[in-house]
Amino acid sequence: MFSNAEYPYLEGTNVPRDFVEFPSQFNEHWASNPAVFDHYAKHYKTGEPMPAALAAKVRAAEKFNGGYALTEILAAAELDMQWHTLPATAPVEDPDVFEKAALERKHLWLTTVPPRYRSSYFAHIWSTGYAAGYYAYLWSEMLDDDAYQWFEDHGGMTRANGDRFRAMMLSKGNTEDLAKAYSAWLGAEPSTAPMLKDRGLQ
């Protein structure tokens, strides 16, 4: 929608996997931002905004079980990578045996955090094009949390910040190296610190 690319399909939306997820995941942050939240989180009968104490509880609950959720997605990303690093000549294996061994190698076979996806129904990595790319969700999350932190550090949701983000990121599509474009917009290399903060794992 914001692309200024000359060839919209080739350059506008046909971007690397992490930049497919990045804009939508970034925009999710605004849903709990008080400037946005207070405009839609209203009582369905009275139209009154959600009481501040309840809104605070909702925001606090967002961080519940952050370590569990992170371990789940790390295990899913590793399982995907392990399957897709097998050579074409590898013998057919029992999927349950393979995934247990694969996650044990990466210290992610944990009885307290069982795999979110089992190999037999992990459709993302078999039929929807994420083969060896499921980790992109985490990389995109790191980018979007870092981007949101940039907004917080630079005055929040202002027209100037939005215009700068649109011009330097959203309008680019796939017309240039997006890692370089991101670092130029951010003024630094990406950091995992905002992601850990967002998950309550600082």
Image: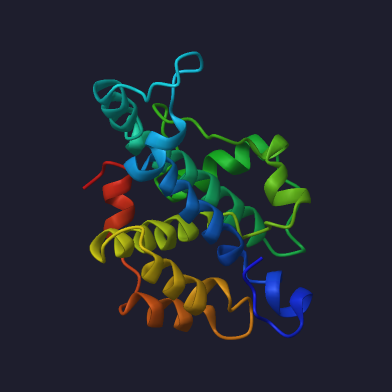
Depth order, front residue of 153/129: 153
Residue 198 lies, with reference to residue 50, above or below; the image says below
Residue 90 location (% of width, % of height): 73, 58
Query: Is residue 197 at least partly visible in the picture?
Result: yes
189 displayed left or right of 2 = left
Q: Residue at x 63, y 62 (%)?
A: 85
Residue 7 location (% of width, % of height): 77, 82
Residue 159 location (% of width, % of height): 40, 66
Depth order, front residue of 84/90: 84
Residue 116 lies, with reference to residue 182, above or below; the image says above
According to the image, what is the colour scheme of the structure?
Answer: rainbow
Q: Quadrant of the N terminus?
A: bottom right
Most extreme residue toward the top is: 45
The total number of labels drawn is 0
* Residue 53 location, quadrant: top left
Query: Is residue 136 at least partly visible in the picture?
Result: no
Depth order, front residue of 145/38: 38
Residue 201 location (% of width, % of height): 25, 44
Q: Residue at x 35, y 70 (%)?
A: 190
91 displayed left or right of 148 = right
* Residue 76 location, quadrant: top right
Q: Residue at x 54, y 34 (%)?
A: 116
